[in-house]
Image (cartoon, rainbow, N blue to C red):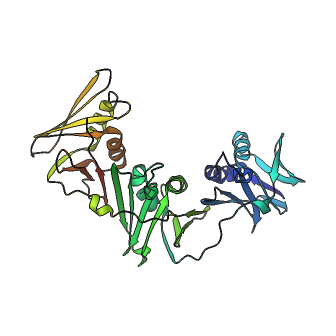
């Protein structure tokens, strides 16, 4: 291997691939990135055996093809520390990769590319295309409600339900639920129900573009999901489990309150400062035309906030985890939010007022 690439062209995909690679591995080669020359491009591949990411880099000059694996973190740190605008020459000499840029010269150990694991090929039974911004928006609205190392492993990911030209993303951790949906005729009549693992969801949010018309082609099989863009190929194994019927978790609220999202967010932020550091509880006191938010901690300190609401139901007192509420009001973009309450012992249903196809449920907590 003897090629020259631009620093900026190499840095972005190398950073993305490094995010997939686990630093602490029982197999040393899993800490490496696979470098391959194909069709005049440098392919960067990283994997943790559950997900695989391939990034593409345009080659400025190529004197010799080749393939090798090298430490993803060390190569990324070197490229990041080099000055902007430089060209980087990568040369494989015996069992070392030489990295040269101007007067800088580095020698990295390598491992054989033949020992690098690849996810086995599968036959995908469903394929469709969608704008990256659309899918990123769905995942961003829901990802924070995923479980973290929950013994119910099906909660440690996002449930993706595709049917009738629509795609729904659902995440829940037993204490809260987030759902966002999108109708797009380009999805077609595909039907699929899969659970994408937590790490894969977070990586896709980082990879996808936040604006523009760039599209992603999605391939789905029984145990695999593949996302193909102009810059990357991201493949993830799926969680093999039955997701619970999330529709049963959505309460039918009987008392509705409408308030300004930003005012509620700021009040929650201030109240959270004096909430219990372990339990993060705040108390909601609903009154006609007003919401009082109170919090206290083990040091007997207290916060008291009042927010005007459009509410004419019965007075009610209910406790919530303030971190869960802040996640939701931060994910909602509309000016106002609608909260539907069923009682002090039932979950609250939170929805954007602008008709955006998303909703959130937070279960109460005892204070």
166, above or below 151, in the image:
below
Q: Residue at x 24, y 53 (%)?
A: 353
Q: Residue 189, can we see it?
A: yes
Is 275 positioned to the left or the right of 40 in the image? left
Which of the 4 quarters of the picture holds residue 253? bottom left
- Left or right, 37 with respect to 55, comes to right
On the question of residue 184 being in view, the answer is no
- Quadrant where the image shows the C terminus: top left
Left or right for 126, reference 245: right
Q: Residue at x 51, y 75 (%)?
A: 127
Spot occupied by residue 333 in the image (x, y as percentages of width and height):
33, 50
The residue most toward the right is 94
> How many callouts does the rendering have?
0
Image quarter in which the N terminus is found: bottom right
Q: Position of residue 5 (x, y in %)?
A: 75, 54
Please give left or right for residue 246 compared with residue 218 in the image.
Answer: left
Vertical order, 100 against 213 (above or below): above
The percent position of residue 210, horizontal first and vertical second, equals: 48, 54
Task: Please name whichever residue, 193 or 345, is drawn nearer the observer in this view of the structure.
Answer: 345
Residue placed most toward the observer, 337 or 299 = 299
Of 284 and 82, which appears nearest the observer? Answer: 284
Q: Position of residue 69 (x, y in %)?
A: 77, 55
Q: Quadrant of residue 165?
A: bottom left
Q: Residue at x 34, y 35 (%)?
A: 280
């Amino acid at each position: 291997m003897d090629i020259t690439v631009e620093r900026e062209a190499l840095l972005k995909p190398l950073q993305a691939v490094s995010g997939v690679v686990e630093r602490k591995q029982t197999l040393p080669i899993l800490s490496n990135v696979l470098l391959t020359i194909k069709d005049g491009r440098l392919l960067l591949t990283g994997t943790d055996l559950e997900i695989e990411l391939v990034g593409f880099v345009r080659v400025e000059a190529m004197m010799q093809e080749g393939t090798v694996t090298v430490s993803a973190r060390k190569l990324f740190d070197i490229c990041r520390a080099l000055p902007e605008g430089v060209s980087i020459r990568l040369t494989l000499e015996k069992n070392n990769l030489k990295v040269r840029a101007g007067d800088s010269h580095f020698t990295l150990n390598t491992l054989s590319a033949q020992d690098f694991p690849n996810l086995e090929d599968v036959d995908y039974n469903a394929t469709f295309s969608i704008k990256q911004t659309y899918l990123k928006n769905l995942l961003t609205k829901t990802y924070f409600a995923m479980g973290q190392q929950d013994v119910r492993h099906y909660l440690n990911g996002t449930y993706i339900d595709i049917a009738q030209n629509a795609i729904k993303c659902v995440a829940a951790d037993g204490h809260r639920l987030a759902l966002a949906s999108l109708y797009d005729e380009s999805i077609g009549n595909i039907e699929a129900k899969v659970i994408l693992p937590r790490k894969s969801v977070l990586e896709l949010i980082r990879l996808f573009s936040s604006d523009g018309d760039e599209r992603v082609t999605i391939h789905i099989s029984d145990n695999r999901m593949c996302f193909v863009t102009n810059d990357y190929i991201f493949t993830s194994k799926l969680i093999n489990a039955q997701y619970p019927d999330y529709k049963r978790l959505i309460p039918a609220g009987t008392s509705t309150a409408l308030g300004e999202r930003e005012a509620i967010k700021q009040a929650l932020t201030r109240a959270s400062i004096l909430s219990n550091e372990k339990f993060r509880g705040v108390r909601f006191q609903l009154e006609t035309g007003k919401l009082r938010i109170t919090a206290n901690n083990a040091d007997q300190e207290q916060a008291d906030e009042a927010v005007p609401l459009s509410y004419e139901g019965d007075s009610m007192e209910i406790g919530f985890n303030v971190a869960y509420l802040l996640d939701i009001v931060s994910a909602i973009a509309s000016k106002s939010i609608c909260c539907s309450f069923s009682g002090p012992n039932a979950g609250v249903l939170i929805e954007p007022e602008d008709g955006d196809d998303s909703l959130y449920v937070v279960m109460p907590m005892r204070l």
